[in-house]
Image (spheres, grey):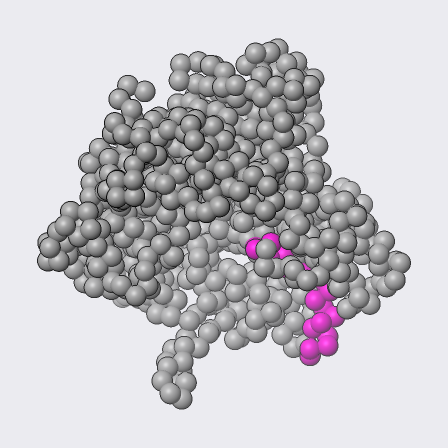
Amino acid sequence: MTQPALLTVSDLRTYFYTGAGVARAVDGVSFTIGTGETLGIVGESGCGKSVTALSILRLVQQPGRIEPGSRIMFENQDLLQLDGAGIRRVRGNRIAMIFQEPMTALNPVFTVGDQIAEVARVHASASRRAAWDRAVEMLTMVGIPAPAERANQYPHQLSGGMRQRVLIAMALIMNPALVIADEPTTALDVTIQAQILELLADLQQRLGTSIAMITHDLGVIAEVASRVLVMYGGEVVEEARVETLFTEPHHPYTEGLLHAMPRVGRRQERLAVIPGSVPPPTAWPTGCRFRDRCAYAWDRCAREHPPLYQIGVGHVSRCHLADEPERRTARATAQVSPAAQAAVPGGGA
Amino acid sequence: MTDALRAPNAAPAPSAAAGVATGEPLLSISQLTKYFPIRRGLFGREAGAVRAVDGVSLQVGRGETLGIVGESGCGKTTLGRCILRLIEPTSGQIHFDGIDVRALDPASMRRLRRRMQIIFQDPFSSLNPRMTVGAIVREGLTIHKLAAGAEADNRVRQLLEEVGLRPEYASRYPHEFSGGQRQRIGIARALAVEPELIVCDEPVSALDVSVQAQVINLLQDLQRDRGLTYLFIAHDLSVVEHIATRVSVMYLGKIVELASAADVYREPVMPYTQALLSAVPVPDPAASRERIVLTGDVPSPANPPSGCVFHPRCPHPAKDAACTVIVPPLEEKAPGHVAACIKQPPTTVPWHAQQQAGATRQPERHLPLAAITHGVSP
């Protein structure tokens, strides 16, 4: 990464104090995002990727809490030290968020024009007239046909793809330095998803915005991200440039995800599987959190929580295989059949 | 995998449902339609209809997996439910193993449902939270009088094992299980009555990638062992390519392309299929990023476009006024490969007929995707 860091998250811990115990949803996550960069954050449900995003904007609700010792440096201030007014000046203004559900993220009783204009009225104290004009301008920028008429419509009168464009317009109206997009295309059809990804890439190029793209879809990551964090069990388990991650994944979880995914144009006899399912955040396994599902795991993995090992330039992996690489080659030659296919009962059962 | 699917007799199937995937189709549908009326005003006057399924014909052979893909609102789910008469079709024929399904009285229909089952998309809402897993799986056995008492208990345990769950889970409730495990429970419930056909309606869409692979492999194993026939409905094109023998693509209630999975994915003919395939994000940062980005949204099925329903968004270079007038027939473009497009030769709509409808451009072969997919490493 050559750009100066815009956002530096260090040792972020967000715990939820529930009746069933302490859920360590985000547990010691550190990363940076450079100016104008797109960072992909990938992982399955329950890995902590969405809570990480909410923590940055301090939108974590009770019984969740960001633990002392966490730091989120953005534009030379620690977001966790700001008071209520201070964080509100950052939210929607310097850092904006695009949510997954374009149906629920918009208010059904206001026109979309009003909702976009509201952002400008709150953050820039724009006049009603000026804010409205700016809203229509934003709708034009995100490629909504007949923007002046559309601004007067209510969310239910727009299609899913249109609503997502409205949310993008809302996010970009203050020209934020960072946009956090949490599964922005997951609820959309694939042809509409292609339109939205193209729009985001185009806007980023024009405006120089940094983007944190949170998704479970490795295909989306490959298209948009330059650097990728893979999360599992509330931790970053691998970080690499996107080309490196797809060609030389190091962590067995990353490797498993890449193999478990059917791909268009590459029909295979049988899909590789990662046995079992993600354990609940109240009971991460000791040592390596992936070891129950890992084909390589040995006794050290249960004893010792792996640190992030340096694999190459800008490439780190939370796996003891970095220390004992001969174990990977030994297993690769010994193994013929895929790992046990039967469902290992998950933590929930 | 194709070969494994085409030869279910390679592994002896336990039930009478076993058979070879050749000859008579197990399921045959012709001109099936489902219109949902739109009512307006005080007296519920019929103001139009949503044409959810609009004249669909297809056949599914024994032991085969027919994939049905399309975007939301294309009618794929309605089609699946119409086949089981969970939704009553408006018109058309459904034949299952030679039986005219639409002519059956309710009692005979219930008996037939033993042979055709469904697996739903959402593993959270499709299982009754007040019933134990055992009771859920057992219900079908009781209703169809297949087993009772200790024998039924044994069957439930066997079924749970077969789908990769522990038999002792029978006494637990659905909320105690993860999404993937619930989907296995749904599969066990469907299998309990030893069906021949299973309509799989987005069975893995709600699951994480790693768990999705487990369930797909399970469905394939069960098919091989039991000689099952699947109608596999999904929006995820890569999943369908992996599991299906043949694939049909739906758009606005109609089938627009139908061929073997290999043909559809290697050389899609219908411009909509081409755009759909090119829009799938490729999990390879080095892959070429050429794609056909369609403009606009899917039109409303209450008011579909005239002529070819895809014409307002179609990127085919020979698209012209004729496309707005002529309804393209689903016709053979290559052996065993049918598609609905009058601008992709060969077509049974002759040039003079197209000219009468205002055509200005001769049909021409347009296969932009061949270059894209073939550019990707094998």
Q: Position of residue B216 (x, y in %)?
A: 62, 43
**Name of the residue lying farthest toward the right:** B150
Please report the residue visible at 48 percent of the width from the left and 24 percent of the height from the top: A238
Corner quadrant of residue A81: top left
Q: Would you say residue A96 is visible in this rendering?
A: no
Q: Position of residue B178 (x, y in %)?
A: 62, 46
Q: Quadrant of the C terminus of chain A?
A: top right
**Name of the residue lying farthest toward the bottom:** B43
Q: Position of residue A49 (x, y in %)?
A: 45, 37
Please report the residue visible at 46 percent of the width from the left and 67 percent of the height from the top: B52
Find out whether residue B110 is within the magenta segment: yes
Q: Would you say residue A247 is visible in this rendering?
A: yes
B251 or A346: nearer the viewer: A346
B361 or B352: nearer the viewer: B361
- Determine whether B155 is above or below A222 in the image: below
Please report the residue visible at 61 percent of the width from the left and 63 percent of the height from the top: B28
Q: Quadrant of the N terminus of chain A?
A: top left
Corner quadrant of residue A292: top right
Please report the residue visible at 45 percent of the width from the left and 63 percent of the height from the top: B253
Span of residues in magenta: B105-123
